[in-house]
């Protein structure tokens, strides 16, 4: 769980980007410019720190979703079975996978304390359309953690399609589990499993929120 939290925390260095910019900013510059703003928001917003789901969800919807390529993330996670899925199944897989990741992302807003994030200078050619942005997360008394972002240049700017922590891909970590589920219950079985988990988690969050 601690490793997952660190992985999710790393996504914060990218999630404060606002509307589409007229000029495409280099991915490392974009990340570096936004990290302090994100940390400031978390530190100043007591509701987010306390786990206010409405505010957290609104922040994620506005700042995170537009800057991640969830279709490609889902395609990588599903692997070779993606080609056997119908367009309708593919659409539903993306929706459920996105909901699962977003649900997981929101939890980090309540566990952030005093971590620091350093964005390393980007090593790439000017015409590269896919790059890896390297960052490190540090916290007093804890080992430094490396978090890498796989990003692709799109018409509306750079988008994240995978995140790795200490060399372990977040997207690929789901591939084995998804493959086993598909082999056992088919594509629809995987969709149902993801949907059930998302629904149960949402219900649980609503119960907790109502108990406060």
Image (cartoon, rainbow, N blue to C red):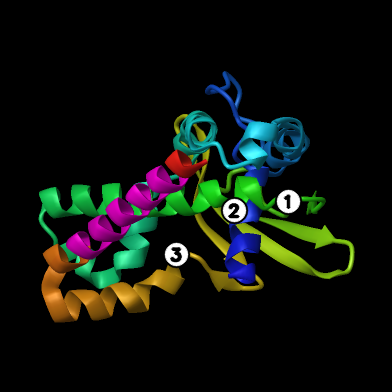
Q: Secondary structure at mark 2?
A: strand
Q: Nearer the viewer, residue 52 or 25?
A: 52
Q: Nearer the viewer, residue 176 or 127?
A: 176
The magenta segment is 191-208
Judging by the rendered image, the residue that carries numbered circle 2 is: 131
Judging by the rendered image, the residue that carries numbered circle 3 is: 171
Judging by the rendered image, the residue that carries numbered circle 1 is: 122
Residue 29 falls in image quadrant: top right
**Residue 96: x and y, percent?**
28, 52
| Residue sitting at x 58%, y 66% | 4
Q: Nearer the viewer, residue 204 or 95?
A: 204
Q: Quadrant of the N terminus?
A: bottom right
Q: Residues within 10 Å of mark 3 (few under 14, many from 20)?
A: some
Mark 1 / mark 3, whichever is N-terminal: 1
Q: Are marks 2 and 1 in contact (CB under 8 Å)?
A: yes
Q: Is residue 145 visible?
A: yes
Q: Secondary structure at mark 1?
A: loop
Q: Is residue 195 magenta?
A: yes
| Residue sitting at x 67%, y 44% | 13
Main SS of residues in magenta: helix
Q: Secondary structure at mark 3?
A: loop
Question: Residue 146 vs residue 173: left or right?
Answer: right
| Residue sitting at x 16%, y 81% | 184
| Residue sitting at x 20%, y 50% | 92
**Residue 146: x and y, percent?**
72, 65
**Residue 206: x and y, percent?**
39, 43
**C-alpha span from label 2 to label 3:** 16 Å
Mark 2 / mark 1, whichever is N-terminal: 1
């Amino acid at each position: 769980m601690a490793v997952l939290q660190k992985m999710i925390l790393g996504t914060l260095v990218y999630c404060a980007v606002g509307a589409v910019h007229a000029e495409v900013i280099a991915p490392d510059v974009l990340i570096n410019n936004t990290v302090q703003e994100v940390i400031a928001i978390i530190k100043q917003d007591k509701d987010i720190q306390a786990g206010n789901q409405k505010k957290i969800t609104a922040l994620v919807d506005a700042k995170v979703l537009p800057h991640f390529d969830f279709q490609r993330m889902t395609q990588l996670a599903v692997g070779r079975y993606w080609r056997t899925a119908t367009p309708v199944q593919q659409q539903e897989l993306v929706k459920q996978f996105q909901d699962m990741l977003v649900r997981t992302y929101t939890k980090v807003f309540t566990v952030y304390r005093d971590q620091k994030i350093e964005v390393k200078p980007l090593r790439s050619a000017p015409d590269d359309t896919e790059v890896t942005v390297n960052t490190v997360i540090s916290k007093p008394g804890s080992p430094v953690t490396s978090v890498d972002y796989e990003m692709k240049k799109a018409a509306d700017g750079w988008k994240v399609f995978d995140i790795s922590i200490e060399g372990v891909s977040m997207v690929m970590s789901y591939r084995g589990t998804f493959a086993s589920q598909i082999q056992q219950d088919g594509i629809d079985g995987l969709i149902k499993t993801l949907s059930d988990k998302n629904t149960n988690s949402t219900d649980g969050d609503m119960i907790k929120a109502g108990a406060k």
